[in-house]
Image (cartoon, rainbow, N blue to C red):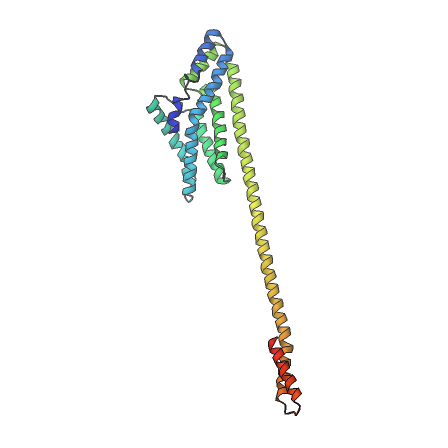
Amino acid sequence: MLSVAVPLIANPIDMGIIELIWNALDEGQIGSLLDAGIRLALMNTVQDLPIYLGALSLAEVLARRYKDKPQVLYYAVPIATVPLVYWIVYRVHGVAYDFTMPAILGIAGVAYVLRLGSASPIKQKWKSLWIVTLLLSGFQWLSISPALTALGFGHGDVSLDLKVAASVLDAEPLLNTLSFMGASMMVISGLITSKFMIDYQAHIRLVQEEKRRSLQLERMRSEAMQARTYRELQVLVHDLRTPLTTIQGLASAMSGFSVSSVDARVHAQAISEAADRM
């Protein structure tokens, strides 16, 4: 599982976060502290992304396979899978993922995309994945804000170390600003993208409905034309049948007369045969 393997690659030591925090404290470099905050938000996003995208994919597969089931059951998939994967990561690597407000908002983001897909089906998989990525990244940016610690953001060990260093260096306002800017940019981008998706799907449905109506109208016109042609043929046949019947009757009468002229009988026979051919 990719979710379990990610901590081997994305961790505070390999990404240089711990070193940057210590350098900031030793040398009083606020730039190093902000760099550590950026890397921490990125690391948290990379660690959580496979988990939430996997939960989204699993819920979408179940929704397509069991369409007759209540939609609320599919929303339970991320609620169940995210804590489970967190626990597996802890058992395998000893890394305790912080299941606090960012995780809860991440689950809410997955549920939002699932709701978006049920109301306006997103046919291309990458669209829903991209929205979740933007929202999740925005929520992780909030984890580095010292002002939001009391609200359940950034309770992990590295996040708390970063905030303590910011307090020592009087850099809390800068870290808060960086956090809010990053979160706002990502979350707003995710919401705008989802709005575009909704409008696009609505446009597609409108085009399909117009096409269906056009085909239906064309079929009705074709059926009306066929009915009109059939009626005209019936009238034409009736108009032809009436004089032909008269001709046939007269020819039969002429052929039955006792006349001496052979030509009269021959002509009457010719009239009758011609009428039969018509």
**From the viewer's perspective, is residue 11 above or below residue 273?**
above
Q: Report the side of 173 relative to 101 (left or right).
A: right
**From the viewer's perspective, is residue 56 above or below residue 228?**
above
Q: Nearer the viewer, residue 167 or 196?
A: 196
Q: Nearer the viewer, residue 201 or 239?
A: 239
**From the viewer's perspective, is residue 76 above or below residue 271?**
above
Q: Quadrant of residue 222?
A: bottom right
Q: Nearer the viewer, residue 152 or 4?
A: 4
Is residue 65 among what the camera can see?
A: yes
Q: Count every numbered label the image shows and give the total.
A: 0
Whole-percent x and y of residue 100?
A: 42, 24
Whole-percent x and y of residue 241?
A: 62, 75
Whole-percent x and y of residue 218?
A: 59, 54
Which image quadrant: the C terminus?
A: bottom right
Q: Residue furthest top?
A: 27
**From the viewer's perspective, is residue 164 above or below residue 51?**
above
Which image quadrant: the N terminus?
A: top left
Is residue 143 among what the camera can see?
A: no
Residue under the image location 45 percent in, 28 percent down: 106
Whole-percent x and y of residue 205?
A: 55, 44
Q: Residue furthest left?
A: 91
Residue under the image location 47 percent in, 23 percent down: 140
Q: Nearer the viewer, residue 238 or 207?
A: 238
Q: Report the side of 108 relative to 213 (left or right).
A: left
Residue under the image location 41 percent in, 42 percent down: 65
